[in-house]
Image (spheres, rainbow, N blue to C red):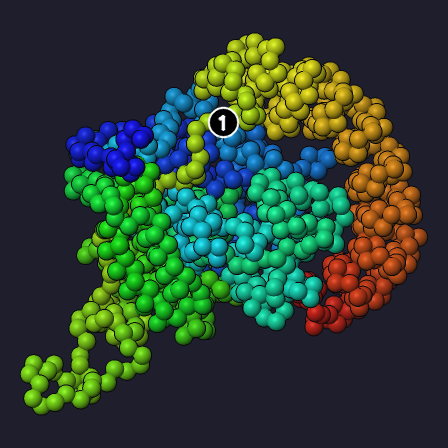
């Protein structure tokens, strides 16, 4: 029998004494090592503060970012978007309920953050001339910036944390989970928690506390029934929401849930925004686009849900019409960067993007300030309503802030918090005692109901009573159920530190569930589309409810609400006219009377009955102060003085944005690598940020596994001279080492200095034995501006298509139109398409003569589309008009695009005919082209003819064009 077990059951750990706590001290405490937390720690340290970073898992692998990121949703890149336009878009997307001062921070600081991340080594997609390849995914605004190596973002951030100068100021403590923010004198002074592996009690005294614990992704129960099969990172259980609430901070917008489209039966996004630039889009079962909304919002989700439920459902992500090159590129992104298990899921069902469109559905509900608007209230420096307490990332209510916004507000929090120095007073004993009890209570009842059972029951109630469409009656029942769940939580049992962590998370979820129910009950209108759809209050009421709904813990431990008017906008938005004003205190929330179905009539009572209750004026026994079994009487409105269950009693909030399953440290070395003691030496060496001379013996080791591990270590630590060492490794005798070196050079392309010594080994690698290495060499030579026309021309004769495509991109970067015309005759369609796109960038209409006559449909389509950038003078305008009659819809779409740059006289008449094309994408291209001619009356008249087009994109883009 294993040691530490009794009768086959693990023996419960002993409860540590309250006074045995390990005490840590710092200027700035950061709770959560994900996106916002790492940036907050880095910035606070750069401002001179001593920083303690606590993570309940391991910082190297923690947070939603560790799962990979395929692009930035909200990059306001100069020349492609304006900050004020972005602020206006977000204001509309959130139905006017925004603090524009916070949104504007992301709008104005986001690009600098992109550049900072790039300096760290994060790779953003760029065109051949080094400009950011921003994409337009939504109908309004171009904000999406792809990240081709997005799977490595967390590794890059961890590398920054481990830099020698940062290690002197940032102490990282993995596997420590705070459960309470400690306060004294009305300000944050530290935290209390425990070690999730040893169970030791831990206290922290700090000058300031930054909460960066992510969303509450584990709120609703997924349709699969799996507790951790959520759309969001399942270890984000609402830790920070509960801690902020119990510390006295205001939360806001909690009734504005996060709901997302996802792949049916798979806990991952369909990624329509990734597929859109490749030509994918959402359709109903008839193949019709149906989304009317111009930007991602709850209204868009309402349209999605309605379509799924209608006879036109199910809904699909349409990909089966795409060419092989596009499908292969999408598979690379979606099956590696976004979700590595996605390819396995589709394969298990026998589905292929080439033959099957992807069925979509709707996720469970969650709370998220960064993707919706439900979070901790913060100002434009990430400060909460509690002094010295900050919130950043998905926890903070900055609507639609996404990844870049999380970085921006982590940076703002770190900079502002750095003004504080470690708290020197006595930590509050009563709060420490309560935190200790919350953590270790399950050990007193080790055989009690296990966490999975209690959590399933709790989240089942969330789905039954809180998920939209909402009603006062169901929300009132939810409040009752969540109040009773205190008993279930108190009875939960645990034996190990890991089980204590999971039990604490159930407490966070219960707190968040009650916040969600009570907030939804308090806002007596419908807003944000599906996110807050009240069937009993179906209308939006801007007169009464153009307000933030703030939630806080009262002095009596109850949840109380305040309606705070939206402040006047910094950027005017025509649809809304907020005037500000004094907040309206609402107090606690009355649940509706739901104990009986309808009005309760007292049955007749015989005169001989003793002790019969008194009868009210209408023959109804008066309810008690708490509303009897049904909660309070009356309507579901927020008024002062109503009873409400205490979200604090018996719960165990906590923190950390980590991936709970993440174990220690990995180097990316394949199976069997651990058999060499030299690799173990490398692992230890990596933690000390070695210089290149220390790594050279491993790079020259006889064992290729050691050399491969040395390349990985070099990539992680990036000492001076890394570029030349990796370029030299491209000539390694082992193909796996060569491939690893090529991948590393691509990963580090933004941080490697263009040293002249790099050119020779890279140029030699262009003629090496491996296509993947040759392709990497050409890409790095282009990006670092170390190659020239002659070198890139030689790559045009490479036998591998991927190398020739990289050669085309490289030739575009040196404006080599003559050589691109040669590439337009290549045997590979993919190379010819790339050449046509390139000639559109650096060529003239005459340079496109050959691809315009190409026998391949996609090459002709690309050449026609390129005329929109080169210009479309005669006779090319006539060729484009003629191509509108081509049998292939791709060619017709390209022809319509070409007429964007043609003279209005031939273009408008031809485009008007394109608006009646049988293929929706051709009609859409026609509408987009007519926008260039919208100053003409005949163009506006043509656009008016598609107001009732069956395709939502065609209708919407025509509407936007006529609005100017």
At x 51%, y 20%, the residue is 674
Q: Provide residue 466's location: percent of width, then percent of height.
A: 39, 63
Q: Quadrant of the C terminus?
A: bottom right
Q: In the image, is 439 to the left or to the right of 161?
A: left
Residue 937 visible in this rendered orientation of the protein: no
Q: Nearer the viewer, residue 762 or 229?
A: 229
- Above or below — where is 333 with respect to 263? above
Q: In the image, is 533 to the left or to the right of 300?
A: left
Q: Nearer the viewer, residue 905 or 314?
A: 314
Q: Nearer the viewer, residue 277 or 875?
A: 277
How packed mark 1 is, by other alpha carbons closer than 10 Å (few <14, some 14-19, many 20 or more), is few
- Above or below — where is 440 with respect to 793? below
Q: Quadrant of the N terminus?
A: top left
Residue 948 visible in this rendered orientation of the protein: yes
Q: Nearer the viewer, residue 41 or 473?
A: 473
Q: Quadrant of residue 629?
A: bottom left
Q: In the image, is 524 to the left or to the right of 804?
A: left
Q: Quadrant of residue 387?
A: top left
Q: Provide residue 121's location: percent of width, then percent of height.
A: 57, 29
Residue indicated by mark 1: 666
At x 49%, y 31%, the residue is 157
At x 52%, y 53%, the residue is 87
**At numbered mark 1, what does the secondary structure look like: helix, strand or loop?**
loop
The image shows a total of numbered marks equal to 1
At x 32%, y 30%, the residue is 2
Q: Quadrant of residue 53?
A: top left
Q: Provide residue 301's location: percent of width, then percent of height.
A: 54, 61
Q: Provide residue 803's location: percent of width, then percent of height.
A: 77, 30
């Amino acid at each position: 029998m294993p040691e530490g077990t009794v009768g086959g059951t693990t023996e419960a750990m002993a409860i540590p004494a309250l006074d045995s706590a390990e005490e840590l001290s710092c200027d700035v405490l950061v709770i959560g090592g994900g996106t916002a937390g790492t940036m907050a720690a880095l910035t606070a340290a750069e401002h001179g503060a001593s920083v303690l970073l606590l993570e309940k898992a391991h910082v190297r692998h923690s947070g939603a970012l560790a799962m990979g990121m395929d692009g930035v949703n909200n990059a306001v890149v100069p020349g492609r978007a304006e900050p004020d336009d972005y602020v206006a878009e977000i204001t509309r997307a959130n139905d006017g309920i925004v603090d524009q001062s916070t949104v504007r921070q992301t709008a104005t600081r986001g690009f600098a953050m992109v550049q900072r991340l790039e300096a760290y080594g994060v790779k953003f997609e760029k065109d051949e001339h080094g400009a950011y390849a921003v994409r337009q995914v939504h109908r309004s605004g171009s904000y999406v910036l792809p990240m081709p190596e997005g799977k490595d973002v967390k590794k890059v951030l961890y590398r920054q944390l481990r830099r020698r100068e940062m290690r002197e100021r940032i102490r990282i403590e993995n596997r420590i989970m705070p459960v309470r923010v400690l306060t004294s004198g009305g300000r944050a002074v530290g935290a209390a928690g425990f070690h999730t592996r040893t169970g030791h009690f831990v206290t922290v005294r700090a000058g300031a506390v930054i909460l960066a614990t992510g969303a509450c992704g584990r709120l609703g129960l997924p349709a699969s029934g799996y507790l951790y099969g959520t759309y969001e990172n399942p270890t984000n259980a609402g830790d920070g929401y509960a801690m902020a609430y119990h510390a006295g901070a205001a939360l806001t917008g909690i009734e504005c849930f996060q709901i997302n489209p996802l792949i049916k039966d798979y806990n991952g996004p369909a990624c329509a925004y990734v597929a859109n630039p490749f030509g994918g889009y959402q359709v109903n079962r008839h193949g019709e686009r149906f989304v009317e909304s111009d930007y991602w919002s709850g209204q868009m989700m309402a349209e999605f849900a309605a379509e799924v439920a209608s006879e036109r459902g199910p809904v699909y992500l349409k990909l089966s019409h795409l060419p092989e090159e596009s499908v292969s590129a999408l598979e690379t992104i979606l099956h590696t960067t976004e979700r590595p298990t996605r390819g396995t899921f589709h394969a298990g069902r026998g589905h292929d993007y080439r033959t099957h469109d992807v069925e979509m559905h709707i996720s469970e509900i969650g709370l998220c300030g960064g993707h919706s608007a439900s979070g901790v209230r913060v100002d434009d420096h990430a400060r909460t309503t509690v002094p010295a307490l900050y919130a950043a990332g998905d926890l903070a209510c900055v609507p639609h802030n996404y990844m870049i916004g999380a970085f921006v507000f982590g940076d703002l929090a770190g900079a502002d918090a750095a003004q504080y120095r470690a708290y020197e007073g006595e930590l509050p004993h009563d709060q420490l005692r309560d935190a200790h009890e919350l953590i270790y209570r399950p050990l007193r009842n080790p055989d009690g109901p296990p966490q999975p059972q209690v959590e399933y029951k709790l989240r089942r109630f969330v789905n039954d009573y809180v998920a939209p469409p909402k009603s006062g009656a169901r929300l009132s029942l939810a409040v009752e159920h969540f109040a009773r769940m205190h008993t279930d939580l108190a009875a939960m049992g645990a034996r190990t530190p890991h089980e204590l962590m999971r039990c604490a998370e159930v407490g966070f979820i219960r707190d968040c569930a009650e916040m969600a129910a009570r907030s939804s009950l308090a806002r007596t209108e419908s807003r944000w589309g599906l996110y807050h759809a009240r069937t009993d209050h179906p209308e939006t009421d801007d007169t009464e409810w153009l307000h933030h709904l703030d939630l806080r813990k009262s002095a009596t431990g109850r949840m109380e609400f305040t309606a705070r008017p939206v402040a006047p906008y910094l950027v005017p938005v025509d649809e809304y006219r907020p005037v500000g004003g004094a907040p309206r205190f609402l107090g606690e929330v009355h649940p509706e009377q739901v104990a009986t179905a309808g009005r309760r009539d007292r049955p007749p009572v015989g005169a001989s009955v003793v002790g019969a209750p008194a009868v009210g004026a209408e023959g109804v026994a008066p309810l008690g102060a708490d509303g009897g079994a049904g909660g309070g009487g009356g309507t579901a409105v927020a008024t002062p003085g109503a009873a409400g269950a205490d979200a604090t009693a018996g719960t165990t909030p906590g923190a950390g944005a980590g991936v709970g399953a993440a174990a220690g440290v990995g180097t990316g070395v394949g199976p069997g690598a651990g058999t060499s003691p030299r690799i173990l030496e490398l692992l230890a060496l990596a933690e000390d940020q070695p210089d290149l001379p220390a790594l050279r013996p491993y790079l020259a080791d006889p064992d290729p596994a050691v050399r491969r591990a040395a390349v990985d270590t070099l990539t992680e630590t990036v000492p001076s001279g890394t570029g030349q060492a990796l370029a030299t490794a491209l000539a390694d005798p082992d193909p796996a080492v060569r491939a690893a070196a090529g991948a590393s050079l691509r990963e580090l392309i933004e941080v490697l200095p263009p040293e002249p010594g790099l050119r020779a080994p890279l140029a030699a690698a262009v003629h090496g034995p491996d296509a993947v290495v040759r392709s990497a060499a050409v890409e790095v030579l282009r990006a670092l501006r170390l190659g020239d026309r002659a070198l890139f021309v030689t790559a045009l004769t490479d036998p591998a298509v991927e190398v020739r495509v990289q050669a085309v991109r490289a030739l575009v970067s040196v404006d080599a139109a003559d050589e691109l015309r040669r590439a337009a005759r290549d045997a590979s369609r993919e190379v010819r398409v790339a050449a046509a796109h390139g000639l559109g960038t650096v060529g003239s209409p005459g340079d496109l003569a050959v691809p315009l006559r190409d026998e391949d449909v996609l090459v002709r389509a690309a050449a026609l589309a390129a005329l929109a950038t080169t210009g479309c003078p005669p006779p090319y305008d006539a060729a484009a008009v003629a191509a509108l009659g081509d049998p292939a819809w791709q060619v017709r779409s390209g022809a319509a695009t070409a007429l964007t740059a043609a003279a209005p006289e031939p273009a408008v008449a031809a485009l008007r005919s394109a608006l009646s094309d049988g293929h929706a994408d051709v009609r859409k291209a026609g509408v987009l082209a007519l926008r260039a001619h919208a100053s003409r009356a005949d163009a506006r008249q043509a656009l008016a003819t598609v107001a009732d087009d069956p395709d939502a994109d065609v209708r919407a883009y025509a509407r936007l064009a006529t609005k100017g």
